[in-house]
Image (cartoon, rainbow, N blue to C red):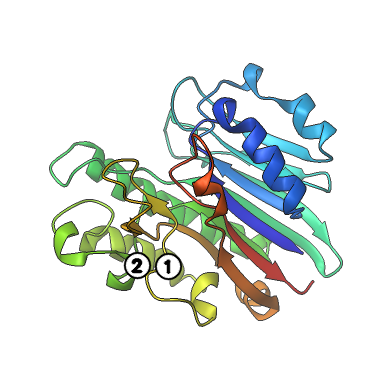
Amino acid sequence: MKIATWNVNSLKIRLNQTLDWLAANPVDALCLQELKLTDDKFPLAAIEEAGYHAAFTGQKTYNGVAVLSRAPVRDVVRNMPGFDDTHQRLISVTLDSPAGEVRVISAYCPNGQSLDSEKYPYKLAWYAALREHVAAELQRYPRLALLGDFNVAPDDRDVHDPAKWEGQVLVSEPERAALRALIELGLSDAFRLFEQPEKSFSWWDYRQLAFRRNAGLRIDHILLSPPLRDACTACAIDKEPRRNDQPSDHAPVVATLDL
């Protein structure tokens, strides 16, 4: 079983890139972030023609998440029950595997904008709510995968120039602590289960030739509960789509599970 996450930064603009990637990389589940379209504009017919089911929640211009899967999904939950938020940032589904049901969550965590922005405490509050939500989900679903754009680089090896980024969002200690608190529920960062090349990143700014210089951050993650961690045999970042014409600024991350 292969599962993947990709912030496509507008599914309308990058639908063909998404379909091409799925044709070349027929994963069992692909979590998408930043759909940037309302539900009535979601390209369901094209997704289904490619052989995938879809659960999604979107909004105009911003945010929006989805799970595309080869098997039908069930038990769909949009956003976090009990957390009052108009932004469409989370969707949870259940998939069946030979080992039993797997809970897959696609997350687009807030960016925070800057340390002195009102969006920064919102980000930390959102993370706290996410931790509660995932803790409850783990009680029901031992096999759980949380995938998405977390907008946090876990530590300095996930940042191309830590000194340059000091004092900015995505790397601040409160954000990293919020991500650690989530992982401490018993989750594992699939990418770090394996030896990886140095300076492995999943996001590069469009400006200043960042991708060409590999001036990036690793902020897209796949977090696995213990049964899925034990079944994980590989995890990698696919940088090829970042070389496309009009690419997303993010690259897909793919994990392989022996289920």
Tell me the tag on residue 200: 1
Q: Residue at x 82, y 57 (%)?
A: 96
Pointer 2 residue: 158
Tally of numbered tags: 2
- Quadrant occupied by the N terminus: bottom right
Left of 47 or right of it: where is 202?
A: left
Task: Report if the CB atoms under discs 2 and 1 are less than 8 Å apart.
Answer: yes
Give the mark nearer the N terminus: 2 vs 1: 2
Labels 2, 1: front one: 1
Q: Judging from the image, what secondary structure is the residue with disc 2 in?
A: helix
Q: CA distance from mark 2 to mark 1?
A: 7 Å
Residue most extreme to the right: 98
Q: Residue at x 59, y 31 (%)?
A: 57
Crowd class of label 2 (few under 14; some 14 to 19; many from 20; radius 10 Å): many
Front residue of 255 and 108:
255
Q: Quadrant of residue 158?
A: bottom left
Q: Is residue 157 above or below residue 7?
A: below
Front residue of 81 and 90:
90
Tell me the tag on residue 138: none
Query: Can you give x and y, in whole percent of width and height, for residue 185 in the image?
Result: 48, 70
Crowd class of label 1 (few under 14; some 14 to 19; many from 20; radius 10 Å): many
Query: Can you give x and y, in whole percent of width and height, for residue 35 in the image?
Result: 54, 32
Q: Quadrant of residue 170?
A: bottom left
Left of 184 or right of it: where is 153?
A: left
Query: Can you give x and y, in whole percent of width and height, for residue 146 in the image?
Result: 56, 58
The reply to whether residue 18 is in sight is: yes
Q: Judging from the image, what secondary structure is the residue with disc 1 in?
A: loop
Kind of residue indicated by mark 1: Ser
Query: Can you give x and y, in whole percent of width and height, for residue 176 in the image?
Result: 30, 63
Q: Is residue 123 above or below residue 25?
A: above
Q: Residue at x 29, y 65 (%)?
A: 177
